Amino acid sequence: MATFLYRVGRLAFRRRWYVALVWAAVLAAVGLGALKAPGAVDEEFSMPGIESQKAFDLMEQRFPGATADGATARVVFIAPGGEKVSAAENKEAIEKAVTGLGDGTQVASAVDPFQAKTISKDGSTAFATVTYKVKSTDLTDGSRTHLEHTLEGARDAGLTVEAGGTALAAEGGPGGTAEVIGVTIAAVVLLVTFGSLAAAGLPLLTAVIGVGVSMATILALSSALGLSTTTGTLAMMLGLAVGIDYALFVVSRYREERAKGRTPQEAVGMAAGTAGSAVVFAGLTVVIALAGLAVVGIPMLTKMGLAAAGAVVVAVLIALTLVPAFLGFWPNAVLPRRARRSGRIEESTETNGGARWARFVLRRPIPVLLLGVVGLGALALPAAGLQLGMPGDEAKPTSTTERRAYDALAEGFGPGFNGPLTIVVDGEGAADPRGAADSIAKEIGATVGVVSVSPARFNDAGDTAVFSVVPSTAPTDEKTKNLVTTIRDERPGIESGTGASYEVTGSTAMNIDIAEKVQAALVPYLIVVVGLAIVLLLVVFRSLLVPLKAALGFLLSVLASLGAVVVVFQQGHGAELLGVEQTGPIMSLMPIFLVGIVFGLAMDYEVFLVSRMREAHVHGESPAQAVTSGFRHSARVVVAAALIMIAVFAGFVGESDSMIKMIGFGLASAVLFDAFVVRMAIVPAVLALLGGKAWWLPKWLDRALPRVDVEGEALSRRPGTDPAPDAAPDREPART
């Protein structure tokens, strides 16, 4: 591996014009394809195999042409203090508003609350449901503006008017602010690390090129592969983060090789052969983690994982080819200012901060290990009370009309009104489908925890009915989950008496089912991802204990970050500092995202840091000396890489959307724990205690594993790779 990548690096250096032109051609080709490709599809979120999804599919089959996926707006009217909505002036204003709401060109219907009797018991609150002919993503700006102007008219009449529903859902996620913040902080970190604008700018430039290629490819293939508009979100975030990191490691190693007196071309080859090998295996661990998202069984999540894995592959290829090519164009520009004129870096023999920290840990391995493990263990304890769900409008800031509408409906109609259950009755095999549906509705209505049951609505064939059940508790309440379980557990007895079957669906039941399926898939996902990564790390480090230690350390950091998320977003401690106004269950996909993304990034740091220790050990240093050498060469760069990752993820904490805020906080805290506690403290402490046993491998396993030479041992024996301290510096690289 090292020899092959050494040759690739030297070739890219010599043929830099060809390499640059090839990447420019690739970027132009996929960019042109993205411009000519049809618009990205708006993929429906689905999770095959859960009851709520089966019920939804049955509704679509038995009620053809129904606008089940059309956008909706639930407009809440609240009378002034002490008045009722039925008062003459208030009623006139509400009816006028409903008439205006129904005038839109994309509107299918607007239901008058006085006709539908959707008025609270105390008469202070009423709501109207507006249904659109198209999905929320297809609503025009004109339709949204018409809705807002109509609401303003009702407010002018003295009513308090709020609105929720999918019609008001904001498009996309972050508006680019988070990425700008992350890139800005990354630039500052790189500048401090390298002390050179060119060295700081090169990783940023190549990362942006890589993200451009990846995103354009996703857009070009979106229609053919059925990729949604959200597929590229994860690809862009990870492509940018790992693209910067991988280029950072190659450039850093290039500067190190130049400090040994090597010519620019030889230094590029050595950097590609050593740091490049680590990049390849680090990238493979990220790809394994992302591709493993297919285990969960959510089509959208699988596509997001594969798209992000593709972006990581592009980042690896960029680091191995385009970075060496750019170093060929400007071989001295990335050097510190004092070395640019001479073209040489004087190799420092002074002990740096990384080496001093390593020696500190080597002298006190047990206290450092205990402090790190106990600290992360304490942070992980709250994860035992993790509650999964899908936060809705109740998690939005009170400054939004959706949140105020949610609160008004809960106050006027009860907390369960915001999350009704939908019961789908399949009476195809029943002698009397209508009688069976009425019996099922009566039985469910008598269940403890049910407030009301709506009249059943039948399809044209008369063999399928749908009705709503309003729970007494909020959608995210644990009692609502128990109610859904109870209704399903009562099914065998009810079905045997009626001859018809029924299933529970709706957004509340869907969220409950998704949470349960994700929770069940988490352990298999961990087994697959961690198992494959351990095998990969066995090949890289040729050690049995180092990969196991790496996996256990990762699990500790992930559990600690999950615990931190629970403390802030579920229990509410420190929530105000992050702008979290409403606590509740943790987003169902959060653990999967956290495990998948952070595992790949954690293995990045493991490979880059420990591979330098392995390299020093292979070249004859004692285990303790190897740990110190690894930290002397890699600690500063790993810290810079981790700070860049934390900056990219922490930028999302400033977003208003609670789910984006939660993802940003979870990922940033996970990288913080893993990089600075696990990799920088626990890893050297464990290696210090293990000593030479850390690199032990059974002979039979040593013979069975392929040799990939990540440490560059073969390169050190090549006659052409010896430093040439007396050689004249290359002010201009030789052209071939």
Image (spheres, rainbow, N blue to C red):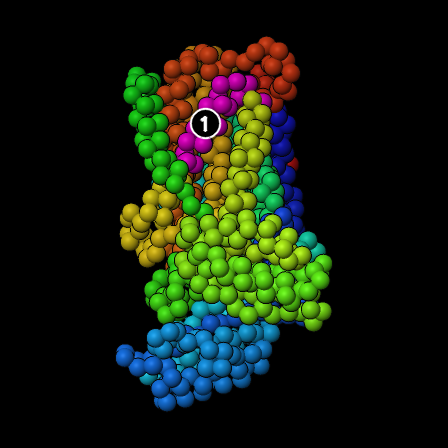
Residue closest to the eye, 391 or 235: 391
Q: Is residue 545 magenta?
A: yes
Left or right, residue 354 beside residue 701: left
Q: Is 102 located above or below residue 282 in the figure?
A: below
Q: Residue at x 49, y 23 (%)?
A: 548
Left or right, residue 597 beside residue 462: left
Residue closest to the eye, 392 or 663: 392
Q: Quadrant of the C terminus?
A: top right
Residue closest to the eye, 329 or 33: 33
Disc 1 packing (10 Å; few <14; some 14–19; many ≥20): few
Residue closest to the eye, 470 or 2: 470
**Image spot of residue 340 (x, y percent):** 42, 37
Three-letter code, disc 1: Leu
Q: What residue is shown with label 1?
A: 552
- Which is the main secondary structure of the residues drawn in magenta? helix
Residue range of the region highlighted in magenta in the rendering: 539-561
**Image spot of residue 588 (x, y percent):** 48, 48
Q: Quadrant of the N terminus?
A: top right
